Image (cartoon, rainbow, N blue to C red):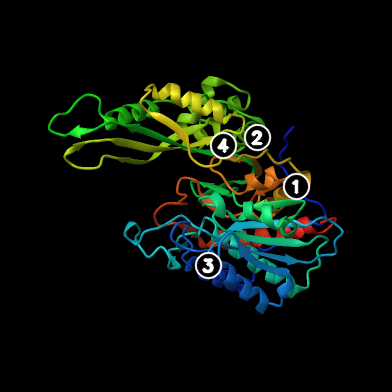
Amino acid sequence: MFRFFLLPLLCAAALTAETIPPEPERQLARDIYKQLIEIKSGYTTGATTPVAEAVAARLKAAGFPDSDIFVGGATPTKANLVVRYHGTGRRKPILLLAHTDVVEAKREDWSMDPFQFIEKDGYFYGRGTGDDKAQASVWIANLIRYKREGFKPDRDIIVALTADEEGGGPYNGVQWLIKNERELIGAEFCLNEGGWGEVAGGKRISNDVQVSEKYVINFRLEVRNKGGHSSMPVPDNAIYHLAAALDRLSKFGFPLKTNEVTRAYFEAMSKIETRPVKDDLTKVSGGAGDAMERVAAASPAWNATLRTTCVATEIEGGHAKNALPQLAAATVNCRVLPEDSVEYVQSTLARVLADDQVKLTTGGEVSKGPASPMREDVFKAVSRLTDTLWRGVPAIPIMVMGATDGLYLRAAGIPTYGVQGFFMDRDDIRFHGRDERMPVQSFYEGQTFLYELVKALSKTGS
């Protein structure tokens, strides 16, 4: 059974860490952050190899030997970096993961150059400031700090900065490392993206820890037709077939339900929520269907937590302005609850689309992984540190609505926990969107949180 720690026990050895790191440590993290943001590592048009090489150079300058640094990947442009900081070996290693590719960003879509690191009005702006170069920068800055301070952990600390998380496929760094260099990243467990601090109304409300996630299925909807001259239209039009099917999809919702992780999440949220929806959150954790309907309607994030979702994301069709379309097609991106099967989702979509002229196929390999166990040492450390740095804020387990590379690690037997300590307004998270940004204070507080968390999980009795 999942347990969470709303009221962490503070032992005699409780930390007294400052919220913000010392100025030299802040400057180091900021310098790395700026360097990584300004390397164009877009999934489609960019490359991760320059990121890996830049970080390797920093590590070597800090005294890490070549033998502890690996740079390589599926192609010359899609390199990963893995570095090992040696401990006593009394315990199995811990893996710290972050990806260095980013979603594409066009200058004309942004208010500024997306690949220029800008500090403005209390925020750091740039593509990847939130997803996921903040965590990559902090892992490296903190690792250099451990070495400079002479920290001797009871386990090796492995940092892996990987390629192609955003698009997956044959160049995905985590999958490539598991297949080709498993010994480099073998660990007892992993800390990754996928969890963050939530702010509502200017108040920190929770530090979320991802223990499971949805998985992704991309479907292609395709209608083919003989076409013809546009001066002689007929009802049998490929675009009309597709449009009607997508309209039916837009009105459909998969069944609402909870699982072990989401029940724990809503139970925790019911204890900290102050709005009228508080009572419904309590009922949701108990499985009440009517309460689920109201909670899903109150928040897109809660809706996505309670059900599988499928949404049209790309569309194409026609070949000439004066011709009836011979092809109309769309991509439907589904984020699927772990307990829902591919077959169930596909058969449900076919029923909803309700048109045998709309061909439905899956695109690419579908990967999913189990939930991570609720390790007591991980959650106690996260809860204790969260309460130390942000008094009264609980750490709670979540199932993330998106997807991360954690699913590959979980499937490979490495439990993975999404935790960052970067607090963001839950109504203004700009990952993958225009003018992506990270609050300056949140970045530095997350740097302190992750520095202390890794130390706590790397020393016996911490």
Q: Where is residue 352 in the image (x, y as percent from the top left)?
A: 42, 23
Which label belongs to residue 273? 4
Amino acid at circle 1: Lys
Cα distance between the residues tagged 1 and 3: 32 Å
Q: Mark 2 points at which residue?
A: 261
**Mark 2 nearby-residue class (10 Å; few <14, some 14–19, many ≥20):** many
Task: Judge by depth and name the residue closer to the eye, 195 or 462.
Answer: 195
Closer to us: mark 4 or mark 1? Answer: 1
Callout 4, which amino acid? Answer: Glu
Q: Do the residues labelled 2 and 3 touch (CB within 8 Å)?
A: no
Residue 392 appears in the figure: no
Circle 1 is placed at which residue position?
A: 380
The amino acid sitting under disc 2 is Val
Q: Nearer the viewer, residue 104 or 400?
A: 104
Q: Spatial distance from mark 2 to mark 1, Cα to Cα?
A: 17 Å
Q: Residue furthest right?
A: 90
Q: Which of marks 3 and 4 is nearer the N terminus?
A: 3
Q: Which of marks 2 and 4 is in front?
A: 2
Residue underneath mark 3: 36
Res. 137 image quadrant? bottom right
Disc 4: CA contacts within 10 A as few (<14), some (14-19) or many (>=20): some
Query: Mark 2 or 1 closer to N-term?
Result: 2
Splitting the image into 4 quarters, where does residue 29 fall? bottom right
